Image (spheres, rainbow, N blue to C red):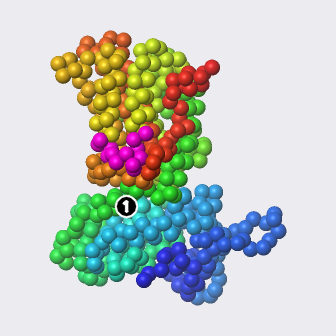
Amino acid sequence: MKLPQAVLRQCSRHLRAQNNWPLQPRLQSAKSILPASHPSSPPSTPWRPSRTYATTTTTTTTVSAADLEFGQPVYETHPHILQPGELTPGITAQEYHERRSKLAFALPENGIAILASSELKYRSGAVFFPFRQDSNFLYLTGFSEPDSLAIIQKTGPKPGDYVFHLFCRPKDPRAEQWSGPWSGLQAAEDVFNADFTGDIAKVETLLPPILRGAGKVYTDITPSTPVTGQLVTTLLSHLHLPPAPLAGLVHSLRAIKSPAEISNMRHAGRVSGRALTSAMRRSWSSEKDLEAYLNYAFTSHGLSGPAYVPVIAGGSRGNMIHYVHNNRLLNQDDMVLVDAGGEYGTYITDITRTWPVNGKFSAPQRDLYEAVLTVQRKMVSLCRENATLSLDQIHRATEAGLREQLTLLGFDLSSGGGGRMDVLFPHHVGHYVGLDVHDTPGYSRSLTLRQGHAVTIEPGVYVPQDDDRFPEHFRGLAVRIEDSVVVDVESPLILTTEAVKEVVDIEALRE
């Protein structure tokens, strides 16, 4: 049986040089994987990580990994971001191995999973967006570079019986002078624990021998997939290996969050919630200023930035569910609806809060807000395994709860009345959340919630501005209240509790 990779990398290995990288990495100890005792030294002498790398010569000359450049943070170069053993913030090399092991175990005999990385996206001309790795690829590898192909090959019936191939770009100092560093082939092996690596430009010759022994291939690669799509699909056709979809298998793993994932999301929720509460303390004159403040607050307190384009919607603009222009002035007598959250270690949090711009609810604003909050509290309390409910069932309970609350406020929502719930509450009450804002797309909301599921609960009421079917004093008001929640057996874990939502707490912020 294949040893866990975090253990495997403890073994000393013969150094191998490659001519295309002046400094080729090769692990000589496990101190970068497991936090062994630091070497004895005076207290004032900082301890330097001890992963070492060979030069291209055949001598034993080594250089510290801290003096090299990689395509993403590693512990030796970024100890302010990563802890020993982590490949990405909060997630260890061991956990990435265990994820691949679970996927391989779910494959049939001689099954193979193939995943392609994302491509670099361009805004305009040569101006590009920051690279964001495909979520499934990242979940299984921790490797955050474009032009890469990952293959997980089942080799036996037991957990851990698999081989991990990672094809990526070799080191190229000339190209990296322009584009910044990338990790290269030996880092793919020694840092990211690939069993076999290869130049992505040579995948046409590297891939066929792997596929010839396949019993079944799972992939979501299509002919239009960048870099390898046409090649992979053509090769599978020639080998008479019709692929099966892979996303469902991966999403079933991603849907149940590990303690490390929950910790990342809790940190993102804590910082994001405090940022929103801090924003409520201030008087804002424009949507753009409020957006800029939140983005700054996220990054200045340890998050990588906003998790998604936020909604900063003053007044009746809150009725537009995904209003993201965020370019209007704020009326002091209106409410502002803010849907914004930050990201940590590529894990996100999703929060919505609605509050009066001037800090004090008017009577209609308070009544409508309290109606939504009453339902939201109840629905959050149902996010527990022993409630044996699905998101779809919680949605139906939300509709019933909002109908009851709005009827008490004078809305005519009877079957013969002019008002309709699908106008006032046009979206689902929640979705899964994790590496993506709308996580694990295609994973059914009709499944009973289990311990480790992470979801949002976000009831809302959006009263059209000029619709005489609804009470006049509520027209144009929009309220949405959203928290990110992890399901536990007997109670929910609210990830975003630092964002205040009680009327008395919101109003007290300005006193």
Quadrant into which the N terminus falls: bottom left
Query: What residue sits right under mark 1 in the picture?
Result: 253
Q: Element at badge 1?
A: helix
Quadrant into which the C terminus falls: top right
- Examine the rendering and report whether any part of residue 258 can be seen: yes
Please provide percent x and percent y for residue 494.
49, 43
Q: Quadrant of residue 251?
A: bottom left
Q: Which span is picked out in magenta?
A: 381-393
Q: Nearer the viewer, residue 51 or 327?
A: 51
Q: Is residue 16 left or right of residue 100?
A: right
Q: Is residue 242 left or right of residue 9?
A: left
Please provide percent x and percent y for residue 299.
56, 44
Residue 324, relative to residue 255: is it above or below?
Answer: above
Looking at the picture, which amino acid does disc 1 mark? Leu
Residue 472, relative to residue 19: is it above or below?
Answer: above
**Is 391 a magenta residue?**
yes
Please provide percent x and percent y for residue 364.
41, 15
Residue 74, relative to residue 304: is it above or below?
Answer: below
Q: Quadrant of residue 89?
A: bottom right
Q: Quadrant of residue 75?
A: bottom right
**Is 55 a magenta residue?**
no
